[in-house]
Amino acid sequence: MAIEFNGCTLNDTVLVIEEVFPEVDLPALHEACAPDGLLLELPVSVWWSDGSYSPVWLTYESAQVNWYYEQNECVFYDTTQIIIHPKPQWLLGADTVSCDGTTLTLDPQWPGDWNIPGAQNILQTNQAGDYVFTAESGSCEYYFPIAIEHRETPNLPENTLIDLCAGTSTTIGVDPSPYDSYYWQNDTLGSWLEINEAGNYQLTANNFCGVDSMRFEVLELVCSSDLFIPNAFTPNEDAINEAWQPLGHDITRYHLIIYDALGNAIFETRDWSKAWTPGTGRIDLPYAYRIVYYDYQGVEHLKVGHINVLR
């Protein structure tokens, strides 16, 4: 560079240096989904609006972030707007119950869609199953599963009268239903109770849908097993004593076999109310019988003998 004045010339030199800034630009708007937050990253360290000096800045809240970069007395300023879209509040829980198949109305109180065609935001259904609600928050989507289960309100049988032989025990109760809990008046849990004395017993069933109770009135009896086995009968078509049949009470697990004179089994039954007649072609020789039964105390008995056919 030269300057002339009144015939005089002055020469000088100026050095011009161009500062080259690194790529420190950020978009004017950043969006992110809670609860992940947002991490801003630059290739160099800068001063952030919270006073920190770092190439990164992490936030979990919406904010306007100011930052600047300084190099050889040159300063670059910028501003970035951050929007963190909130996660929807889910008030329905992970599962719910429909009593007796009633229709449920599920309102998440948040914009979105159910995974059921035609169901938007509010779902009405009487079908058990697994459902998913997709909630929208800004540009973010959140998925909330919910299981719908059907339960029946407890409905126990009518009150029951039970006879109990003295000195014995028995079991009272009902077959359990799914999802019901059962308890007795003495706080015993379960739908069955073993008892050995007379009295009134109350069973209660309850679940999410309701409560029901029933009573068992147990009467004590003096019992004894007895079996009378006739040794003859008269199948002569006079309508009197035409069939042969043992008689008794308080007998279980009865098994009768009748044999002819040659030892062939000709009649068999486990029903002790069923009588026997020899039918046509009978012979008047004695028949043999074998009976196995159990008494009211569960003791096994064996009876064998002969049956005479009288004319």
Image (tube, rainbow, N blue to C red):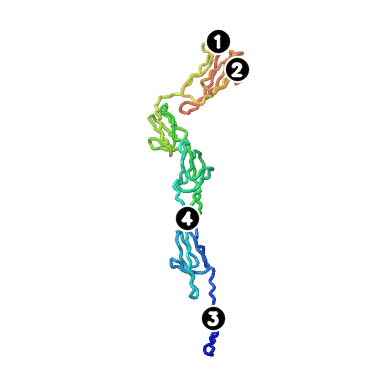
Where's residue 123, x and y in %? Answer: 48, 42
Give the vertical position of 84 relative to 13 (above or below): above
Residue 94 disc label: none
Q: Are marks 3 and 1 in contact (CB under 8 Å)?
A: no
Query: Crowding at label 2, few (<14), some or many (≥20) Cα neighbours within 10 Å?
Result: few
Q: Quadrant of residue 277?
A: top right
Q: If the image is split into quadrants, where does the N terminus sit?
A: bottom right
Marked residue nearer the N-terminal end (3 or 4): 3
The residue to which callout 2 is attached is: 261
Q: Nearer the viewer, mark 2 or mark 4?
A: 4
The residue to which callout 4 is attached is: 85
Residue at (49% x, 53% y) in the render: 138
Residue at (49% x, 48% y) in the render: 112
The residue to which callout 1 is attached is: 237
Could you give the CA–CA distance between mark 3 and mark 2, rounded to whole angstroms?
Answer: 142 Å
Residue type, label 4: His
Give the vertical position of 305 relative to 69 (above or below): above
Q: Nearer the viewer, mark 3 or mark 1?
A: 3
Q: Residue furthest bottom?
A: 7
Residue type, label 3: Leu
Could you give the CA–CA distance between mark 1 and mark 2, rounded to whole angstroms?
Answer: 23 Å
Secondary element under disc 4, as helix, strand or loop, is strand
Residue type, label 2: Ala
Q: Nearer the viewer, mark 1 or mark 4?
A: 4
Q: If the image is split into quadrants, where does the C terminus sit?
A: top right
Query: Crowding at label 3, few (<14), some or many (≥20) Cα neighbours within 10 Å?
Result: few
Marked residue nearer the N-terminal end (1 or 2): 1
Q: Are marks 2 and 4 in contact (CB under 8 Å)?
A: no
Q: Is residue 52 visible?
A: yes
Secondary element under disc 2, as helix, strand or loop, is loop
Q: Are marks 1 and 2 in contact (CB under 8 Å)?
A: no
The residue to which callout 3 is attached is: 15
